[in-house]
Image (cartoon, rainbow, N blue to C red):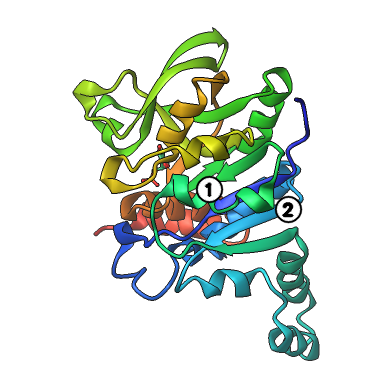
Amino acid sequence: MKKEITKAVFPAAGLGTRFLPATKASPKEMLPLVDKPLIQYVVEEAVSSGIGEVVLVTGRGKRAIEDHFDVAFELEEELKAKGKHKMLSEVQRIADMVTFCYIRQKKALGLGHAVLTTKRVVGNDPFAVLLGDDIIDGKVPALRQMMDVYKRYPATILAIQKVPRSQTQHYGIIDGKKIEKGVYLVKDMVEKPAPDEAPSNLAIIGRYILTPEIFDALERTRPGKGGEIQLTDGLRILMEDQPIYAYEFQGTRYDAGDKLGFLKATVEFGLKNPEFGGEFREYLRKLKV
Ligand code: G1P
């Protein structure tokens, strides 16, 4: 099996409890990083990596995501009438970027379950999964880097990054054997282990290339950490039949689902903004709080 990856799944049904109260009535995926919602950055990463079809797994209270990627008739008419052509084409571009398909996950039963809900839509092709909390800023989009690795290792590939030992309980952690620069053959993995139980400090970050056999594995996955059906546990089952690789991508990753991580991303993206980055830098330099 060596097929192009054209479909990407975006699990976006989570309740965003780490970001309450902001996420009480608004989806966390719509929190703006400078001037774009988080989910748009990740969709743009997928599109620039060659994805043509996005499968968004949503839930109650997530309608704003669908509206964001839809046409906005009244707004477009208004912008046309006022001659605001640059903003008009930006607004239209968002709706035209890629084909969207939406699936409602009725209950937040875990990341593995969210992926499983896409079984019929994804079908029998390898596909990507991107988590909207993880914003990755890199010269080459992180998913593109993984697709290049997939060309050499046409199998499941997990994005990983080294994290401080003290942080392992926030991630899926792999045990792997390095087979070339940045590429590991995964020997085992565990979801959110305590630092003294973690097999390494190589953490799974929210980008995956999965083979379609993951669906059968997820069907056999019992609830794990937090009583949820974990993707990590499904991957462990898949690993009994297929090799799984992990790839240390190049780029800076922000945990934008976390308040501090989100602030860091906001400051750094603000500093890089061509329109007002310079002014913002000056402002920060002079700040005496
Ligand atoms: C999920 C996965 C975890 C992974 C993390 C990356 O956890 O379950 O294995 O390391 O994403 O962001 P979550 O952060 O959704 O709890």
Q: Determine the residue positioned at 30% across, 57% down.
A: 18
Of mark 2 and mark 1, the one earlier in the sequence is 2
Q: Determine the residue positioned at 71% across, 18% down.
A: 152
Pointer 2 residue Cβ closer than 8 Å to ligand 1: no
Where is 93 relative to 203, above or below? Answer: below
Q: Determine the residue positioned at 49% across, 70% down.
A: 62
Q: Nearer the viewer, residue 137 or 183?
A: 183
Residue that carries the numbered disc 2 in the rendered image: 53
Ligand 1 lies in quarter: top left
Residue 141 visible, this angle? no
Instruction: Point out residue 57 in the picture as x, y percentages from the top left corner.
Output: 55, 59
Where is 200 relative to 203, above or below? Answer: above
36 relative position to 281: left or right: right
Residue that carries the numbered disc 1 in the rendered image: 115
Where is 196 relative to 168, above or below? Answer: above
Pointer 1 residue Cβ closer than 8 Å to ligand 1: no
Q: CA distance from mark 2 to mark 1?
A: 15 Å
Q: Mark 2 belongs to which amino acid? A: Glu
Instruction: Point out residue 204 in the picture as x, y percentages from the top left corner.
Output: 44, 32
Residue 123 visible, this angle? yes
Q: Which quadrant does the N terminus fall into?
A: top right
Q: Based on the displayed image, in which of its 4 quarters is residue 37 positioned? A: bottom right
